[in-house]
Image: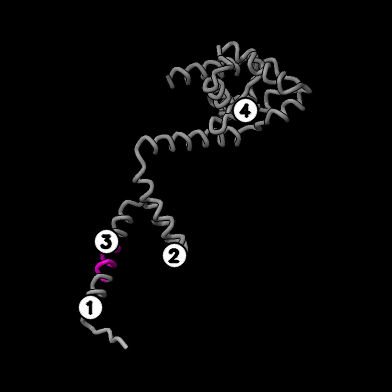
Amino acid sequence: MTTVTHEALHPVIGRIEAAKAALRERFEEHLARASEAVVLKALDLADDKAFATLAKVDVETKRSIATRNQEAVSRMKARAFERVDSRCELLDAKAACEILGITKQALSQKAKGGNLLAYTNTGNRRKFYPSFQFADNKPRVVVAKLINALNVDPADVEAMNFLVQHLVGKMDYSNPGEPSNELPRFNLLDDSAALEIIKRDYVNALTAGQ
């Protein structure tokens, strides 16, 4: 039988303790890179999940600035779609076709001709059609007039998305001294006075964004 002496074990124990110390130091550095939100989130998780959450921090720091910028843009696009979707009903092509009683090809032609608003989810390029532009199973004429008046190119995805985002936003349509009366802009399209304000605000917002 081979007897393992204390002298033989000592170097092994020393290496293990040194490794532990190095790992603790690396973990402390890792924690220092984590945001307060990530640390607090990890604190409420089970150990394995907490360590997995903290492990992602190092992955983020190793990504290039270009990659992180692209990820940020992707998240921003997703939030933009979610914001519009929460403020109005977005119909897919099938639902829009059923309402209008036309084919998808005819729907596409109407959108390309500036007779319909089409909102594009730039994350996956899918097109959606705000329901507020339909009435009595027809496109509202005011929508086509608005697109034309604002000189929005239906083929310009960003321009069309910007218009939809503008219309789902709220405006205070009350007289001075009256209580605030905030309504989605698309609810005021049939009011000629409000429509002029909507046009003016769109041009101002577009100019400020350029």
Disc 1 versus disc 2: distance between alpha carbons?
A: 31 Å
Q: Quadrant of the N terminus?
A: bottom left
Farthest residue toward the left?
7
Residue at image location 72% in from the left, 18% down from the top: 106
Which image quadrant for residue 83? top right
| Mark 2 surroundings: few (<14), some (14-19) or many (≥20) residues within 10 A | few
Q: Earlier in the sequence, mark 1 or mark 4?
A: 1
Q: Amino acid at mark 3?
A: Glu
The reply, left or right, for residue 120 in relation to residue 1 is right
Mark 1 in CB contact with mark 4 (< 8 angstroms): no
- Secondary structure of the residue carrying tag 4 is strand
Q: Earlier in the sequence, mark 2 or mark 4?
A: 2
Q: Position of residue 108 (x, y in %)?
A: 67, 20
Could you say which is closer to the camera, residue 185 or residue 207? Answer: 207
Q: Earlier in the sequence, mark 3 or mark 2?
A: 3
Kindly identify which residue carries mark 2.
Answer: 47
Residue 39, placed above or below residue 185: below
Q: Earlier in the sequence, mark 4 or mark 3?
A: 3
Q: Amino acid at mark 2?
A: Asp
Label drawn at residue 25: 3
Dominant SS in magenta: helix
Q: Position of residue 197 (x, y in %)?
A: 55, 17
Could you say which is closer to the camera, residue 150 or residue 66? Answer: 66
Kindly identify which residue carries mark 1.
Answer: 10
| Mark 1 surroundings: few (<14), some (14-19) or many (≥20) residues within 10 A | few
Kindly identify which residue carries mark 4.
Answer: 127
